[in-house]
Every structure is written in structure tokens, then in C-alpha cells.
Amino acid sequence: MRKFQGEKLVVATHNEGKLDEVRALFANKSMEILSSKSLDLPEPIETEDTFIGNARIKAHSASKITNLPALADDSGITIDALNGEPGVYTADWAETPSGRDFSLAMKKTHEALAKISAPYPRLAQFRCTLVLAWPDGHDEIFEGALAGEVVWPPRGLDGHGYDPIFQPKGYDITCGEMSFESKNNISHRSIAFKKLSRACFD
């Protein structure tokens, strides 16, 4: 397992919500966190059909362009009754001609479940794969998952993505109703980050 030794880390994302989560999770680390957006890096085309494959594309692209270690995640929601969909296409379900609209994506998810009369509870998982890549092509991979169920109608104004329709196992509120700090303590991303931190940063 390779340790991170640098002073700068590129987070390969243009998503401000994800960047905020990463900054919070790395709050106690003494390094400068840059992002693909702040560096005006291109968004590589995600051609893989797995979270690991797409995270590797993003991490290696950013690392090669900047000559710095780069961290990328690929994450999404997998729903048992939909045979794991939307999965790696989670963000695609939100695409519109004028940008991503996750209220539309949540509606689309609800309609897909209603169409097949999916039984309750509608079990689902938030999944996150992190890839830390170095300019020489080496990488380390970490995964995290948060189990729960899809609910309707959406509840809560906090969070992002599908948070308002995802109720974690053991909770009676959705991720959209949780505070930023509470969600960060249990999220799929924080689970993967704890593995990453122990292996490469501690």
C-alpha cells in the first residue's frame, strides 16, 4: 500500500458538493486540496460500466495532466428492485439539456419502481469507490457502501443528488434531512475515506 507523501492533492471533480465533502473529511490533514474545476481540467469521458473503472479514468487523467497525486470517486445509488440501476449511470438519470436536475432523477427513479410495483421496503445502497492515483500510473482503490431504502415523496432540503429519497438503514429520516456533519459521519463516501485515510494518509 503506497503512502501519500506530497503537499498537494488534486480532487478530480467539478462537483462542488463532492468537493465540500472531501475538504471536510480531510480537514485535519496538512495539505493543499485543489480541484479539477479550480484547475480548469477537462472532464474525461467515463467509458467504463463499473464504479472502479470510471473512478480510475478520472483519477489518472487528473494526475497525468497536473503531475500530482489525484483522488477521484465514482459513486451512485444501486436499487435492488431495479437490478442495481441506476448504478454507474446515477448522474445520467439527472441529465437535461440545461444541466443536471436531481429532482427529475428522483422522479424517474420513483416512476421506475412504481411501474414494476416494487415491494416495500425498496432496498438500496449508496456506493462510493475512491481511487488515489499517482503520475507514474500507480493507484490504490477503496470502496464504501451505505445500506438503506428508497422512499417517496422526497424529504429534506439538505445534501445533494438522491439524498432526499434515501433513508439509511436504522434511521427514520432521509440523508436530505440530516445535517452535513451527521451525514458525513455515516455516508458511503466517509466509509471509503476512512479506509483510504488509514491506508495512505495515517
Image (tube, grey):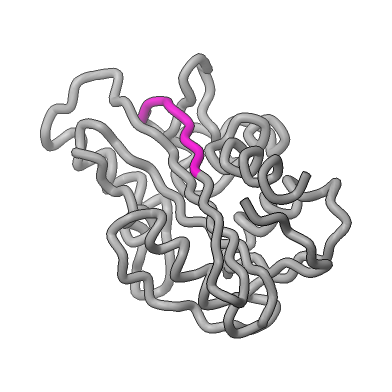
Where's residue 96, x and y in %? 34, 68
Q: What quarter of the picture does the C terminus occupy?
A: top right
Q: Residue furthest front?
A: 1
| Residue located 12% across and 37% down the image | 115
Q: Is residue 148 magenta?
A: yes
User: Against 112, is 39 above or below?
Assistant: below
**Labels in figure, total:** 0
Q: Which residues are magenta?
A: 143-151
**Side (left or right) of 80 relative to 8:** left
Q: Position of residue 48 (x, y in %)?
A: 31, 65
State whether residue 78 is above or below residue 26. above
Residue 156 sits in which quadrant? top right
Residue at x-position 73% and y-position 45% = 25
| Front residue of this view, candidates 46 and 170 | 46
Residue 92 to residue 57: above or below: above
Nearest the eye: 76 or 176: 76
Across and down, in percent, residue 32 comes to 82, 66
Please name the residue shown 22% across and 41% down the image: 111
